[in-house]
Image: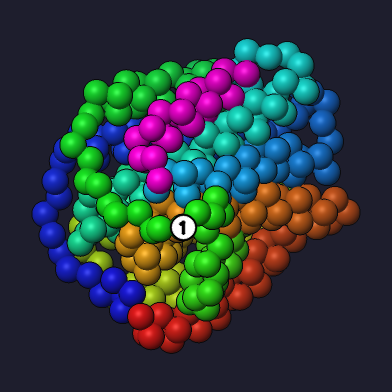
Amino acid sequence: MLGGKVRCMKFKIEKKVIFACILMFSLGFEMGGFQAVLRELSLHFSIDKVSWGFLVSSQYLGIIIMPVVFGRVADRIGKKKVLLVFMSIFIIGTCCIGLSSWLSLTVIGFFLTGSGYGVCESVSTALLSDQYADSAHRYMNLSQAFLCIGAVIAPILTSLQAINWRLVFLISSGVSLIALIVLLFEGGFTVVPSYSSSQLLDLSLFNSKAFVLLFVTMMIYVGLENGFGYFTESFFYDAYASSWGGYAISLYWASMAISRVITSMSSQHIFKQLRVRFILVAVVFIALFVSNSPAFALLLCVAVGACYGPIWSYIMSLSAGMYPERTASVTGLISSACGIGGAVYPVFMSAIIANAPLGSGYLFLSVSSLVAFLLIFIAHRRAANY
């Protein structure tokens, strides 16, 4: 796994896979919908642009904190138990957002949603790693493709005014409830021997330089995702006076879903793919910065999604492959990296665009992508020692 080469194998369509796909769809619907309705939600609560990043960060605060602790707990007491609890927390959080008219309760709702999101994504990913160790990255890509599908559908529905911003979160809550019911009646999970340690936080993972490099790379990558996703709708509105922003987000997630499905079938040379994708996306961000055409910008958004594709699954799979006896601890820490990047980058982007055109934020994302390329280059050499 760490050498970056994998073989093509047939899929096993089981309840565990169906559960993961439904769960990821609900998470993606919330994420893509949130990105598409951020400006509308901000107008409802009279929040200025500088505060947008902090509103997004309230959700990612939960993603930062909870997976680190409860990934280790999941390795101890069982992943199914932890999933049932945090899926319930996700449902409560999305209902708070969808039903409340108080900003304070909405912020709490975003924190609960982020907590449920982070733990559910990381622990379900660890579950797939346990159940399908020889082809884990392929099932991760498949489930993440459904996350993308959810993130495609929500912005389309909001662009067509088929649903309002409140329904985005209530629909996500309902789909997550379906996934919870599927998991509740599913058994036969592979029991993986747990790493023997009394520590609640398994920070010994950071003794590996390769793991640290992958951790930081994931932090940057999710920062790239959010730095792009949460500001694209507003970018089209401000730069081109265009309402295509919602469609741009949908096409972005659609191309990412297609890319993930393709790479879930067969993929090789994972480290090489990661390097190539980070270089390509850096170039695309520069093109977005200089673009003066909404149609061309729309195509570039598709290119961003295609480049991103399996990056998340590849980094997660490589990380989990280092420590097969404590997959939830690993995925929990990597999800925390996701949360850090997801929380920090919107704040950086808000600061950058406060006194400059929205498109200037893409230059920051381009430089970040080049840094990620460098980290993956070094991580490949470090991982060869495993």
- In the picture, residue 221 is in which quadrant? bottom right
Q: Residue at 50% across / 84% down in the picture?
A: 378
Q: Is residue 381 visible?
A: yes
- In the picture, residue 2 is in which quadrant? bottom left
Query: Is-magenta flag for residue 92?
Result: yes
Q: Is residue 217 visible?
A: no
Q: Residue at 46% across / 28% down in the picture?
A: 85
**Percent position (x, y) of residue 371?**
61, 75
Query: Is-magenta flag for residue 188?
Result: no
Residue linked to disc 1: 197
**Percent position (x, y) of residue 330?**
45, 58
Q: Residue at 59% across / 37% down in the picture?
A: 114
**Percent position (x, y) of residue 193?**
29, 54
Q: Residue at 74% across / 61% down in the picture?
A: 360
- In the image, which residues are magenta? 76-96
**Helix, strand or loop for disc 1:** loop
- Report the side of 1 relative to 375 (left or right): left
Q: Main secondary structure of the magenta part?
A: helix
- Report the side of 379 relative to 245 (left or right): left
Query: Eyeballing the image, is 325 above or below 53?
Result: below
